[in-house]
Image: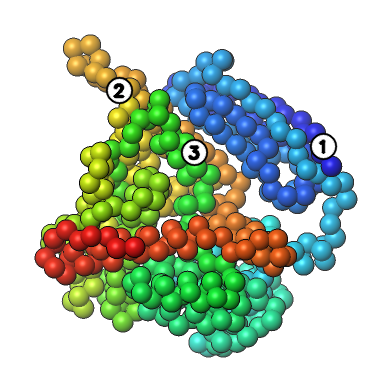
Amino acid sequence: MHSRASLNWSRTQCSNGSWKLVYFVTCLGFLQKKSKFCKAICNGLNFDMDIPAFSLPRTSVWSSIYISSYKSYDIDIAVSSLPFIHTPPTTKKMAETRIRFGILGCANIARKVSRAMLLSPNTTISAIGSRSLEKATAFATENHFPESTKKYGSYEAVLDDPDVDAVYVPLPTSLHLRWAVLAAEKKKHVLLEKPVALNVGELDKILEACESSGVQFMDATMWMHHPRTAKMKEVLSDPQRFGHLKSVHSTFSYVGEGDFLKNDIRVNPNLDALGVLGDAGWYSIRAILWAYGYELPKTVTAFGDPEYNESGVILSCGASLNWKEDGKVATFYCSFLSNLSMDITALGTKGNLRVHDFVIPFNENVGPFYTVANSRWAELSLGCEPEPSEFKITTVLPQEALMVQEFGRLVQGIRCGEAKPEKKWPTLSRKTQAVIDAVVASINIGFKPVDVVY
C-alpha cells in the first residue's frame, strides 16, 4: 500500500553569505521499511533524505543542505511514494524483528557502539560478556543497557546464548582470530572491530569460518555508513564536475592522552602489534581505496623513518600507493604523535574534494565537505575562482548507528531466508588488510616498493 507525505522546504541566507536549504516531510501513515523518500537536486548534486523504519504517523523528518551559492533554478525537490501500513506493529512484534547483539568485552569503543545498538531501530543488546561478571555488570549499568540484557563472566557464555543473533567483537586484534572464528562456528553473525586481523592469513580464516556457517561479516569502519560518504562519491564519479581522479592524500592522527603511549592496548606488541598502522592507518587506507573504487594499487612503498615505542610498535608511519596507470597515486600518514587530523584530499582533472573530519564528524549529526570545479587564477593572479562550495549532509542517526542498522538489516534478511550474506563487506576488509600487509612488508625490507597481493 502506498500513501502520501506532505513536503515543505525553505531557504535562509546565512551571515557569511551561504545558503541553508531545509526540507522536511510529514508522514501520513506508518512506514513499513526504511526509505529514501525525499530527493533534492542542488547545484548539480543529488541528496536523498532517509526516513527510518517504523517511524510513527504524522512524524516530521527534516534535513538541510548548506551551499555557498544559490539560485532558484538550481534546486528541485520531490517526494517519492512510500510503502506505509496503517496499523503499527505491536511492541512484541517489533521486539521479535530486532537483531539481538552480544558484546564480547568491555573496551572503551564498545561504549560508543553499544549506544548505537540502542539508537538503531532494528537492534538491541541481549548479552554482554567480560572476563569477570562484575565488570560485565558494571559496564551494562554504566551504559544504560536494557534490564533484560544478560551479563556473563566469560566470552564463551555469550556465544552459547541462544538469544544472541550476532556478536560485536571489540577485543584486541591479537584475539580476533580465535573469537571471531568461534563466533562464526556458533552461527553468530560477526561485527568485528578494525583492524580485523594482524594479517590477511588470519583474516582469511575468519572469513572462511563465516562463509562456512552462512553468517554475515562486517568490519566496524563507521564512516562508510554516513550519508556524506555516498554524496562525496557522487562528486568523485561526476566526469563533468570532477573529471578523472589523479591523486588522493589522507591523514588520520591524534595524540593519546595520559599514559596512552605506555599502557594502551594499541601500543602493546602482544595485543595490537600493528600499532598506529592498524588503528589509524586502516581508515586512511580504506579512504584511498574507496576513492579509487576499491581498485587495489599495484605497489606500496612505505615512507622512511617510521617512529616506534620501546616495544617496537609503530607510533607514526606513512606510505605511497601507485597504480602504474594514468598517473594515479595516493599517499597516507597516520600517527599517535601528531595533533588530531582526519583529512581526505582528492584531486581530479576538473575538480577537487576535501573533507576534514571523515573518521568521526565534528558534529555527529552533520557531515561537511568541500568541492570546487574548473578552478582558475583570478585576474592578475590576485586570487582564485570560483571559491569552494561547502556541503553539509545531515543525519538523524549518527554514523555508528547507521552501521549497526545496516548490519542488522543484512542479518535479518539472512535470518528470514530472504538473502545470503553480503559479500561486499568481507571483500572491502580483505583489500584494506592486503594494503596494510604491503606497508608492513615494505618497512621490513628497507622501504622498497612491494607488490600488493590479493
* Crowd band around label 2 with a 10 angstrom C-alpha radius: few (<14), some (14–19), many (20+): some
Would residue 42 appear left or right of 287 to someone viewing this image? right
Residues at marks 1 and 3, CA–CA distance in whole angstroms? 28 Å
432 shown above or below 21: below
Would residue 148 appear left or right of 361 to someone viewing this image? right
Q: Earlier in the sequence, mark 1 or mark 3?
A: 1
Residue topped by disc 2? 375
Residue topped by disc 3? 231
Residue topped by disc 1? 3
441 shown above or below 378: below
- Label 3, secondary structure: give it: helix
Tag 3: residue type? Lys
Q: Quadrant of the N terminus?
A: top right
Would residue 412 appear left or right of 83 to someone viewing this image? left
Q: Quadrant of the C terminus?
A: bottom left
Nearer to me, 392 or 37: 37
The residue at 55%/40% (across/down) is: 394
Tag 2: residue type? Ser
